[in-house]
Amino acid sequence: MTWNSGYVTDVVYTTGYYEEQSPSRIALSCLLGNVAPGFGRRSDRLTYLEMGCGRGRGALCLAASNPDWRVIAIDFMPAHIAEARELAEEAGIDNIEFLEADLATLDPNTLPEVDVASAHGVWSWVSDEVRAGIVRILASRLRPGGALHLSYNSLPSWQGALGLQRLIHTAGRRIGGRSDRQAEGALKLVESLGAAGAYHLDQADLVRTLKKNLPNMPPEYVAHEYMNDDWRPCFHADVAAALADAKLDYVASGEILENFPELMLSEEQRAVWKGIEDPGLRELAKDFCLARGLRHDVYVRGPRRISSGARNAALNDLHLMLARRPEDFVYKVDFPAGHAALERSFYEPVVEALGQGPRRVGDLLSLPGLAGKRENPAELVGMLVGTGQAAIMTRPEAGSGEAAGRLNDRIATRVLQGDSPHGSLASLRLGSGMRCSGDHYVTASLIRRLGVDSPIEQWPAAIGMPADSPAYDQFLKAAEATRHSQTPVWTQAGII
Ligand SMILES: C[S@@+](CC[C@H](N)C(=O)[O-])C[C@H]1O[C@@H](n2cnc3c(N)ncnc32)[C@H](O)[C@@H]1O
């Protein structure tokens, strides 16, 4: 067996940002699960650990957005760690350490005690030995009261697609060569079998969706998702049982909206679900009802139940900002349980107030006309943050954040050189990132350099794009549209 123990290591993974990994979101999940976020009071001096950090963009964004934190990010692929360290150095982010280490064998004593840990897209893609290593690290280094975010491919959603993964993995291995080429070749076989009416490629929703979407995904993504020897989707109860060895208890979903059964389950499903006492069985029943294939779980080492008064006080104390322009706010939203309309008489004044600047949740709930109407901060925060239309601000009064600006600019330069465009803009005020695409990095960086009102015609030259470039007109159009829609949001977040 080589050092990679059957994990794909001959191509680097894609970049991405997942807000579920951010401590402020993890703390919100804890509150929604009626548990005190044990790390809340020290939010300015957290030690954060990411296990299986890939190319490190998420960890870097958190480090740049929280200069007083200590961030440690581990991955066993030297190419990932080398790239992440290079970017940290270029951007002058010095509160992060990237460790090249195998989670299966890493001595936990080499790590400090951590307040919050996260492993996104790792647990169901690695071997039993690596999972055991993750539990060992958590058992030894996650402090009492500390929290874990863990995502994994879940069962039963994936049961219909187990065969699809085996087909891609086996066909790819027979083809040989680099893993992304293997994945591309295997997808051609999937396509041919699908076109020929193969029964099991048409039986499950997830298989049908994957069959349609996978050919449009970056091959390196497909390789890391499907070409690992030990990939195995998991039942929640089995994950929870493994983590119990680290004295961790499941407290809530990291997907904010999943903590609201009335949005996720139909009335009939809720009636059955409510009758179930056992928490593990409850989650299994929920997993039988929901079509999603990836679970985001939040666990706490020694959860302490919180009274509803203390919970509401903590929620009321959160600051929110709108993550889009007020005119782009969406009042009709699709949830698994059906469509829901965000009641205009309640949400319109909230959106209007947030359009003027960040607000404390408690202040929003006391806006004229709303006081006494809704005393449930959980619903307000859950709907706004869960639908991605508002973001939690951990430092609403802070300046723009030099480290965050440097990181955003460095990534913009890389995007212009053709680097993977997916990620997030770091923000000191948010204390986390704002998910974005490549052109957002570039536009934000140009606004920072040239000013928000600078003539757009100056922008192409500033990025070295000649006027006769075939991309010129398209660039101007896209940049203007992004400037128009994002300026109010980025200004509030201190990104520009
Ligand atoms: C699917 S990727 C997810 C990466 C990142 N969390 C993200 O979501 O972008 C899984 C990551 O786990 C890393 N990994 C796999 N096995 C590992 C091990 N034994 N020790 C450390 N890292 C490992 C891989 O190198 C890869 O970067």
Image: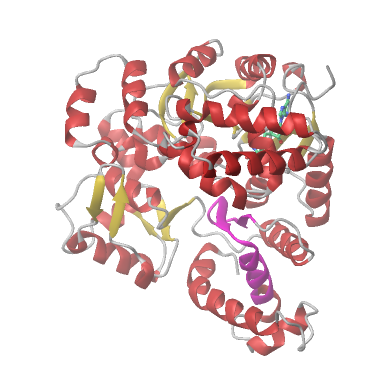
Q: Is residue 364 above or below residue 299?
A: below
Q: Is residue 459 left or right of residue 153?
A: right
Q: Is residue 57 shown in magenta?
A: no
Image quarter of residue 116 = top right
In which quadrant of the rendered view does residue 181 lie?
Answer: top right
Quadrant showing the N terminus: top right
User: Relative to 186, is 384 on the left or the right?
Assistant: left
Tell which residue pokes out farthest to the top in this image. Answer: 245
- Residue 6 position, x and y percent, is 75, 23
Q: How are the residues colored?
A: secondary structure
- Rendering quarter of residue 108: top right
Up the image or down, 423 lies above or below 2; here it is below
Relative image position of residue 138 (x, y in whole percent)? 61, 19
Name the quarter where the C terminus is drawn.
Answer: bottom right
Picture residue at 61% right of the left edge, 16% below the top: 135
The residue depicted at 59 percent of the width and 44 percent of the height is: 191
Q: Nearer the viewer, residue 388 or 224?
A: 224
Q: Which residues are magenta?
A: 422-447
x, y percent for residue 317: 37, 47
Residue 96 seen: no
45 to 124, vertically: above or below = below
Is residue 438 shown in magenta?
yes
- Residue at image coords 14%, 52%: 372
Q: Quadrant of ligand 1?
A: top right
- Nearest to the observer: residue 65 or residue 149: 149
Q: Nearer the viewer, residue 417 or 226?
A: 226
x, y percent for residue 46 = 60, 36
| Depth order, front residue of 292/252 | 292
Residue 423 visible within the image: yes
Q: How many marks?
A: 0
